[in-house]
Image: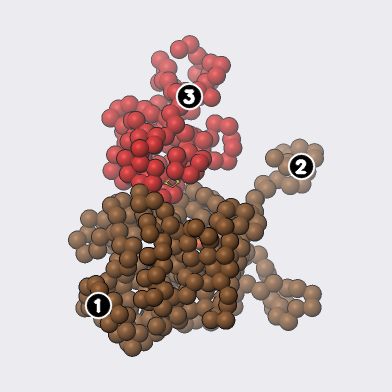
Amino acid sequence: MATTRDGAPPGWVRLCRSDEIGEAQSRGFDPGDEGQDRLFVVRWQGQLHAWRNACPHVQGAPMAWRRDAYLNAAGTRIVCHAHGAEFMPDSGLCVQGPCRGERLSPIALVVDADGELFVKS
Amino acid sequence: MKIVGLESLVFGVDDIGGAARFLVDYGLTPVELSDRGGRFEAMDGTAVVIARQDDPALPPGPVPGCRLRKTVMGVADEATLGAIAAELRRDREVRRLPDGSIESIDDAGFVLGFQLTARRPFVLAGEISNAPGGVVFRPVNSLGVPPPGSVIRPRSLSHVVYFVPDVVKAEAFYVNRLGFRCTDRFTGTGPFLQPGGSLDHHTHFLIGAPPHMHGVEHFTFHFGGPSEMITNGYRFVEKGYQAFWGPGRHILGSNWFWYFNSPFGCHIEMDADMDQHDASWRPREATASADNSQTFLLKMRKKWYPGPGIPENGDYA
Ligand code: FES
Ligand SMILES: [Fe+2]
């Protein structure tokens, strides 16, 4: 995608450099400056995935327990730290807990040739 | 039966260091901390205990995924301990542990412990409001707002809230077998329960929920008053923790609340100024809704007067 380092193409917003998020790590973002992370990005088996910070169990519920802490200790599951629902990092499918079978809402992301990470705004 | 309230809650976690830091930042005091777990006490010695989730010494949770492994209640005397053991032995196993406590299970699958209470009595004035015409005032020249840097500590383990698949059965166990009283009730949701040796509006609240939600909604400690509790909550948020609901004040129980996410697979609350009731109290019944559970909800406004970097008319966003 065509972009400059500090400018994002229309409809996309720059989050960070993609290599700032290591394997089995997560990071929250608040691109609209709403005072709470609107989305978070995880790297799982090399791939980045972006999800809305909104648990399907209680509409809109924020999921981390501490800033950027969206995963279990092993980095194998996304966890909602409201009531412990566990989700697959790549599919967003809830595999244990109060919303089993439901899914997180995905957000389209792209990494440009310079390694910058953008999501659909 | 003189059950005086919660003594400790035992959780199995996957990250001892992270959970320990969380509890210290909440205000609890670590004792016996190691890489295998620890005990985190309020001012009266009531506590949260954490251990590794695969620690073989931990009893099982009610369902896989529930990190609460044991709820320990304190009792006033040996007679109560004996009475509980005799009552529960009628239809279930009761184990006597080496520390003199007993262990059994409730009808919703939560493992229970009962011990002679080790609560340490203390005297420390709670928050006092100055009101014209009032009888009790804060000492002159003392401050209502906790100053920056002041130490704020939880005073006592307050209550735990369970999601249970059969709320009628779960309530019957606490009322008929352990002598709890229902103080108030959310219709179709569940009862607030008070044990025989406490005046607190509730030490337990039961929520009827589908089986896949079976577990814990939250637990909380009492703080010295709303100003102290809310100050502590803002400090917690500044440390990077995630608020969920609050600060506000409940209607049933009148307790001030602020809920946060936690590494325990449930919410943790900070609470203050809960109503007390005795046997003359008539339980109320209300339908559960946000409107019926919060009398008000506060929102912090960062900028509220014109000034440097602030629009001329203030900022009312
Ligand atoms: S809000 Fe996420 S598990 Fe309940
Ligand atoms: Fe509560």
| Direction from residue B76 to residue B315 in the image, left or right | right
Camera-nearest residue between B67 and A109: B67
| Side of B279 relative to A107 (left or right) | right
Residue B277, quarter of the rendered image? bottom right
Residue B189 position in % (x across, y down): 48, 58
Please identify the quarter of the rendering in which residue B162 is found: bottom left
Q: Mark number for residue B314?
A: 2
- Give chain A's shade: red
Q: Earlier in the sequence, mark 2 or mark 1?
A: 1
Q: Residue at x 54, y 31 (%)?
A: A31
Q: Which residue is mark 3?
A: A119
Q: What's the chain of the residue with tag 2?
A: B
Quarter of the picture containing the N terminus of chain B is bottom left
Name the mark on residue B89.
1
At label 2, the amino acid type is Gly
Relative vertical location of residue B55 with respect to residue B65 in this rendering, above or below: below
Same chain for mark 3 and mark 1? The answer is no
- Residue B194, visible in the rendered structure: yes
**Crowd rating for badge 1 (residues with CA inside 10 Å; few <14, some 14–19, many 20+):** few
- Give me the chain that's brown: B
Q: Tell which residue pokes out farthest to the left in this image.
A: B56
Residue A29 percent location from the top left of the image: 49, 34
